[in-house]
Amino acid sequence: MPQKVILPETLEGKTILVAGAAGFVPSTLSEFYLNLGAKVIGLDNFITGSRSNIELLSKYENFEFHECDVAEGLPNFEGIDIDFIFSLASPASPIDFKVIPLEIMKVNSMGTWHLLELAKEKQARFLEASTSEVYGDPEIHPQVEEYVGSVNPIGIRSPYDESKRFAESLTMTYHRQFNVDTRIIRIFNTYGPRMRPNDGRVIPNFINQAMNNEDITIYGDGSQTRSFCFVTDLVDAIHNVMFSEVHTPFNCGNPDEYTIKEAAEFIIKTLGSESKITYHPLPEDDPKKRRPDMHKLMTISDFKPKVGFEEGLKRTAEYFKSLK
Ligand SMILES: NC(=O)c1ccc[n+]([C@@H]2O[C@H](COP(=O)([O-])OP(=O)(O)OC[C@H]3O[C@@H](n4cnc5c(N)ncnc54)[C@H](O)[C@@H]3O)[C@@H](O)[C@H]2O)c1
C-alpha cells in the first residue's frame, strides 16, 4: 500500500516548469502554484492557448514566460534549478484532432521527450498529462487504471489517443531506464473558466448555445455518457498525484456520470435558456461511456471533488459572459 499523500504547506523557493501555460488547465494550475509561493516558468506556442492567460499570470512577480514550441526544443535553462515539470502542452479538443493532428502527435511525442530529458538533467519530478482517451471506446465501466484500453490506432481520434499512449510509454521508460521521478495522470472531461468559447468541447458548446438560446447540438441520440470535472477540482487532483510516491497512472476527474442528453437538459435548466435540443450523426469512434474509477487516488489522498455540476456550470457561464 503506497504511503498517504502529504501536501506541502508552501512551495516557496521551488521552481515549477509548466509546458502549455497559456492553456485552460495549465494556466489554472500555474496560478495555483504561484499562490503556493513557487516560481513558475511557463512555456507555450499559443497554438490553442490564449495570450490573456499569460497576461493574467504575468501579474505575479514569480512568473516567467518563454514563447516556444516544446516539440522543436526548449529554452536554455543552464544554471537554473527546476524542481517540478508539468507536461501539459497539447491541444485537447476533438475539433483539433482533425485540424492539427500532426502538431498534436509532435507535441505529445517530441515535446514530452524534450521535457523528460530536461527532468533527467535537472533531477526534477515530472508529470505527464495523459487522458481518458487512452481507454478508447472502453469495454469496461467505470474505467480503472489497470484497463489497457480499446483504441482504434488508425481512427480520426488516433493522433490524440495514440500520441498520449506513446507519451505514457515514454514517461514510464524514462522512469525505468533513468530512474526519473515520474507521475502520469489520465484526465477525464474537465471544464471551467478560461476554456475557449469556440473550443468545440461539449460543455463550452452547450453553455454558449444555451446562453444564446440557440439549438443545442447533440451528436448521436445523447445516450452516451461523460463525467465532468470542474477545473479547480482537477488541479487539486493533479497536485495530490504530484506529491504522491506512485509512478503508475492515476485517473483524475469527477466520477458523477451524465448522459449527454441529461447534461444538455441540465444546462438549459440551470441557465434558464429557451434552447431546443437537435440531434446530429455521431462522429466515428465516439466513446459510448466515460466515467473514472477514482479509488486509486482517493485511497492514498484526501482528494474529493468539491464543485458540483450546477455551480461549475454557473461559474463557467459567468466567465463566458464576461468575455462579451
Ligand atoms: N481539459 C480536458 O478535459 C482534458 C482532458 C484530458 C486531457 N487533457 C490534457 O490536459 C492538458 C491541457 O489541456 P487543456 O484542456 O487545458 O487544453 P488547452 O489547449 O487549453 O491547453 C494546452 C496548451 O498547450 C499549448 N501547446 C500545444 N502544443 C504546444 C507546443 N508544441 N509547444 C508549446 N505549447 C503548446 C497550447 O497553446 C495551449 O496553451 C493537455 O495535455 C490535454 O491533452 C485535458
Image (cartoon, rainbow, N blue to C red):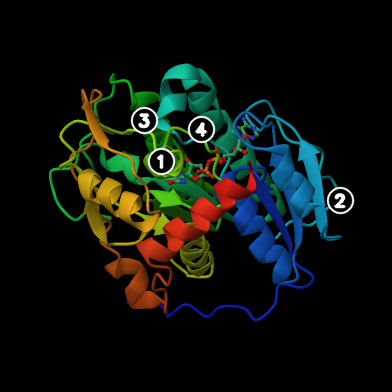
Q: Pointers 2 and 4 in contact (CB under 8 A)?
A: no
In the image, which disc is placed on residue 198? 4
Q: Earlier in the sequence, mark 1 or mark 4?
A: 1
In the image, which disc is placed on residue 162? 3
The amino acid on which the numbered mark 2 sits, given as a three-letter code, is Gly
Mark 4 Cα-neighbour bin, 10 Å: few <14, some 14–19, many ≥20: few
Q: Which of marks 2 and 4 is nearer the N terminus?
A: 2
Q: As rendered, which of 321 and 187 lies closer to the eye?
A: 321
Q: Earlier in the sequence, mark 3 or mark 1?
A: 3
The quadrant in which the C terminus is found is top right
Report the side of 205 relative to 277 (left or right).
right
Mark 1 Cα-neighbour bin, 10 Å: few <14, some 14–19, many ≥20: few
Q: Is residue 201 above or below residue 27?
A: above
Question: What is the spatial separation of the Cα atoms under label 1 and label 2, in whole angstroms?
Answer: 29 Å
Mark 2 Cα-neighbour bin, 10 Å: few <14, some 14–19, many ≥20: few
The x and y percentages for residue 246 are 43, 65
Closer to the camera: disc 2 or disc 4?
A: 4
Q: In this view, does 262 lie above or below 96?
A: below
Q: Pointers 3 and 4 in contact (CB under 8 A)?
A: no
The amino acid on which the numbered mark 1 sits, given as a three-letter code, is Ser
User: Which element type, helix, strand or loop, lies under badge 3?
Assistant: helix
Q: Which of marks 3 and 4 is nearer the N terminus?
A: 3
